[in-house]
Amino acid sequence: MTALAPQLVVRPEDAFQDFFRSYPVDEESKYRKRLAQIAVSEGRSLVVDFEDLISFDPDLARKLVTKPDEYLRYAESAAISQMKVEDPEYAEQVGRLFVRFRRLPEKKALRRIGAEHLNQMVLVDGIIVRVTQVKPMIVKAKFQCRKCLEIIAEEQEGDLMSGPAGAICPMCKQRSAFKLLEDESVFKNTQEARIQERPEDLPPGQLPRYMDVRLEVDMVDFARPGDRVGVTALVRAQREYYGEKGKLRTFTLYFDANYMDVIGKETEVVEITPEDEKKILEAAADPWIHRNLVSSLAPSIYGYDDIKEGVLYLLFGGVPKHMPDGINIRGDSNTLIIGDPGTAKSQLLQYVSRIAPRGLYTSGRGTTAAGLTAAVLREKTGGMVLEAGAMVLADKGVACIDELDKMRPDDRVAIHEALEQQTVSVAKGGIVATLNARAAVLAAANPSLGRYEPHRNVSENINLPVTILSRFDLIFILKDLPEQEADSRMSQHILTLHKTLSNPEAPFPPDFLKKYISYAKRINPVLGPDAVKELHEFYLKMRAKSGGADAAIAITPRQLEALIRLAESRARAFLRKEVTVEDAKSAIRIMTVSLSDVGIDVRTGSMDIDVIMTGKPRSVRDILQKVIEIVSELEKETGTVEESLLVQVLVEREKVEEREARRSIGQLIKEGVLYSPKPGRLKRTSG
């Protein structure tokens, strides 16, 4: 097909009408069909693909970008003229059609928008972080003269409303007061949104830039906080004011939106070309693909193969399920790394935030609940507005939270819902909303005593409540233990890094790894019969290990769901549409590694999931129960119980070590189950 360019110098309006009528040249007109659809659906906007206009008339396209105010008027006039041909009745009814242009050839970075772009059309990408309420704005005001009762119509522009000039009635020529007739005036819906740079576009160490976007008519309520959007807009400037003193010489830039495309609705934001796809499929055909992927993840960090494998499964993610009864089961895995200082946790988190198709890194020390979830702020006009936080901005990506244990407990509670339900609910200042936070969470924390103490359970080693620990699918512990051979290899690795200033040879460069993960996330593998059998047998075997109603529980249905997610992630890594028995076995292996680190009762050495789920293994709960029973028994005889006698009974009758007995009594006093009416005596609290 050859492009048909106008041969004669024609009016821009006629050129646009010719484009709407005859593009594409040899086939049925694309835009006549769209106009017919608008008439049927009673729409207000004609969406034009900018590349069509470029191929039809490059000069017209160029002028539209450089003089959009003038040329948009020509386009709208041409659209309504063409609509009069297609459907005269609807053209009369609608009065005005908006022409919206999408897919401009060049995207501008938000931070590069400046004075040189004023009153030009640009395309920018970003995340919506704030949206105001929809408000009607007056377009054509009708006033009534209080003396002669004549009605005067005035077109309205700018932020402030203007009345008849000089307050002199043009009809009776007298100075008069005017009454606004709201019923007869014409209004349009308007809304303001704030667009911010995407985390992956942010230069290192820079604050994200943002810009306000004005939306009108059919574009209001098009996007909500957390959505990733591409905005075709006209760059405007608004004068700044300095208190009561007047106008400053500086202006604030804002966008007047022409078209908004929500690109955040797809899983995919990384562009993959056919050549990339070919390379990805070739890489996946390699029998060593799994080892290659693990080796390519943070190659500058030495070792940690199991942890890297767990993080890799987190990046690929499982398949989210939507049940017919409305229940959603998350597909994203959450992983927690607890490590001694200097074990490269932060570097791993920052690497993952860069390699994830959508990644966001934040540190717990300077993070608040509102910053993590959503904030309700008061806008200039006095209304309340919702602003998205880190978990919402990481929607359909990975949120890396460093120093999770350093967050204030009140703020940390905010992520409970996001970890399990993958939503953020807000009920503040009259705003009740639920935002999506479908993000995998990779968190890191330090042991509360500086180093991880192997003789203590995980809940005693880390300053995190069990309510958060139980929501992580995998928990890894990094212990910095001296071991000559490993230390020798580690030091050699670090010295080589510093000497050569280059990463060890990784099978895949970071850009390719990012594209591979993006491509794999398009595949939704289903559980194969062999995989189902393997997971079923493992679950039953682990439950049987418990050994009866009174024994410790080794695994719960929550871990079974985590195993399914991990197996699906591994199938995605191989670009398979079915989860195989190998995937199930690998998921079981990595889960066993995690449980053998944290799901162990250090007192008995047996696997006990209650260490993570409740913070107290079965053995500790049993001792506490025995203490309460003995206190209850002795109370009947003496009223209060002598502490030394209680310890003696526990040691002799129940074979509990004296240190353990005293610690259990102290814990029950701390929890308010026992109290001391006088020194050395104990009593149960009533109820």
Image: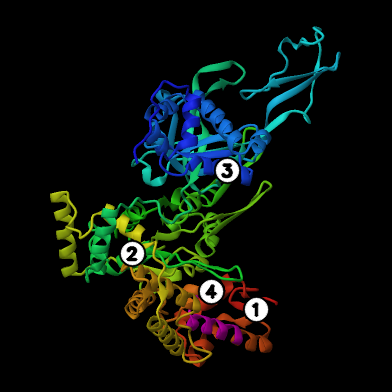
Image x and y of residue 283, in percent = 24, 63
Residue 684 bears which disc, if any? 1
Residue picked out by circle 2: 312
Nearest to the eye among marks 3 and 1: give it: 3
Residue where numbered disc 4 is placed: 666
Q: Is residue 138 left or right of residue 45?
A: right
Crowd tier of the residue under label 4, counting other residues whose Cα lies within 10 Å: few below 14, some 14–19, many 20 or above: some
Q: Amino acid at mark 4?
A: Gly
Residue 91, quarter of picture:
top right
Disc marking residue 633? none
The reply to whether discs 3 and 4 touch (Cβ–Cβ < 8 Å) is no
Identify the residue position indicated by label 3 in the image.
36
Q: Quadrant of residue 495?
A: bottom left
Task: Provide residue 197's location: percent of width, then percent of height.
Answer: 43, 41
> Do tag 2 and tag 1 residues touch (Cβ < 8 Å)?
no
Label 3, residues with CA under 10 Å away: few <14, some 14-19, many ≥20: some
For image coordinates 37% across by 38% down, the residue present is 206
Quadrant of the frame with the C terminus: bottom right
User: Mark 4 falls on what kind of element?
Assistant: helix
4 and 2 marks in contact (CB < 8 Å):
no
Q: Nearer the viewer, mark 4 or mark 2?
A: 2
Q: Main secondary structure of the magenta part?
A: helix
In primary-sequence order, the first of circles 2 and 1 is 2
